[in-house]
Amino acid sequence: MAEIIVGGVIEKEGKFLLVQEAKEKCKGKWNLPAGRLESKETIFEGAKREILEETGCKVELIGLLQIANIVSENDVFMSIVFSTKMIDENIKFDKKEILDVKWFTYEELLNMKNQLRAYDWTINSIQTLIENKAVDINILKIIKEEKKKLC
């Protein structure tokens, strides 16, 4: 099965907002706010929705930080991580899905190898932001075509 994961890095005053997973397979692990793209949703809509659902924060997507391909025994994932600009910070979340939402410094995250759900994915995304190497978001185009024209 193939899935697309979308999310973003939220930065404020040198700290980064992460969510603590409640799902049994990764319970207690910290992660960037991200999740599965839904049917009939653009990657942009999906990333903003996932961030809002997991943190309560409304954001504007401003850059592309990372595209990754993850292949496991039974699944294939494509992940897209955006840099964001906070529009409305209103921390709230569904406790069935997220245990906690917390701000971390980059130095704290570097020392959380066993506590992050996807250490390299998280650190690489944040490092790209810190180094000001985000790619212009306009590189990702939405092509509007009628479904019946797709072959």
Image (tube, helix red, strand yellow):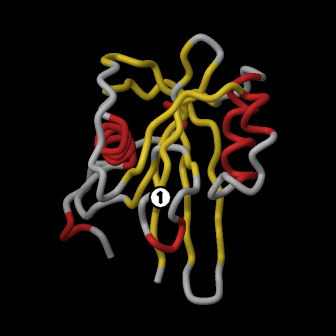
Q: Is residue 98 above or below residue 85?
A: below
Q: Is residue 130 above or below residue 110?
A: above
x and y percentages locating residue 93 in the rendered image: 30, 42
Q: Residue at x 27, y 49 (%)?
A: 94
In the picture as drawn, the residue positioned furthest to the top comes out as 13
Task: Work out whether residue 46 or residue 53 is closer to the camera in this orientation and state it.
Answer: 53
Q: Residue at x 39, y 48 (%)?
A: 43
**Amino acid at circle 1:** Ile
Q: Secondary structure at mark 1?
A: strand
Question: How many numbered discs, if any?
Answer: 1
x and y percentages locating residue 55 in the rendered image: 36, 37
Q: Classify 10 Å Cα crowding around label 1: few (below 14), some (14-19), many (20 and above).
A: many
x and y percentages locating residue 81 in the rendered image: 55, 43
x and y percentages locating residue 59 in the rendered image: 37, 26
Q: Is residue 21 above or below residue 93?
A: below
Task: Work out whether residue 3 or residue 51 is closer to the camera in this orientation and state it.
Answer: 51
Q: Residue at x 57, y 88 (%)?
A: 74
In the picture as drawn, the residue positioned furthest to the bottom comes out as 74
- The C terminus lies in quadrant: bottom left
| Left or right position of 19 against 115 | left
Q: Residue at x 23, y 59 (%)?
A: 40
Q: Quadrant of residue 96?
A: bottom left
Task: Work out whether residue 102 or residue 40 is closer to the camera in this orientation and state it.
Answer: 102
Q: Which residue is mark 1?
A: 5
